[in-house]
Image: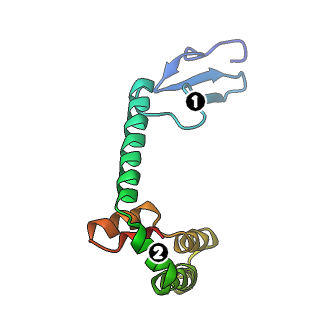
Amino acid sequence: MNGTMNQTEGQYRDGYETAWNGSNTYNITPRNVTTGFQSLFSPVMDMAISGITIIILFITMVSLGCTMEISKIKAHILKPKGVAIAVVAQFGIMPLTAFSLAKIFQLGPIEAVTVLICGCCPGGNLSNIFALALKGDMNLSIV
């Protein structure tokens, strides 16, 4: 069999390329191997989605900023009780809670670090959007 070629050599079957290597074994490799992320959309559609997302984010941020009032911001700076509570909660209570949850549920190292990062970096824009939706103090949420 050393001098004969297999009939499937170089042919495509089920998305795989098979090649006879002469030692009674096949070398089977995928035909379309890509590296990295490949978008499900065409490049034009991908650019359109990116543009729409940027516009929506811009409108949301500007509208959140427009709800702020200078007099209320000054009041929060002069009497920083609410800001102090937020700082203690964000940099003390939330990381401690995340650490405790990681220990209680006996998470692995990667999962524990993930929970700790989420506990140390809360909310962002989403907390401001929730404060606006629930008629909270937007000035305190942004400050």
**Where does label 1 land, which residue?**
33
Front position in the image: 57 or 140: 140
Q: Earlier in the sequence, mark 2 or mark 1?
A: 1
Residue drawn 41% across the image and 24% down it: 44
Q: Is residue 74 above or below residue 27?
A: below
Q: How far, Cα to Cα, is label 2 from label 1?
A: 59 Å
Q: Quadrant of residue 136?
A: bottom left
Q: Is residue 1 above or below residue 40?
A: above
Position of residue 23 measured from the top left corner of the image (x, y, whole percent): 72, 26
Asked if residue 122 lies left or right of residue 110, the reply is: left
Asked if residue 33 lies left or right of residue 21, the reply is: left
Mark 1: which secondary structure?
Answer: loop
| Numbered circles on residues, count | 2
* Amino acid on which disc 1 is placed: Val
* Amino acid on which disc 2 is placed: Lys
Asked if residue 81 lies left or right of residue 24, the reply is: left
Mark 2: which secondary structure?
Answer: helix
Position of residue 37 measured from the top left corner of the image (x, y, whole percent): 54, 37
Position of residue 96 measured from the top left corner of the image (x, y, whole percent): 56, 85
Q: Quadrant of residue 128?
A: bottom left
Front position in the image: 97 or 64: 64
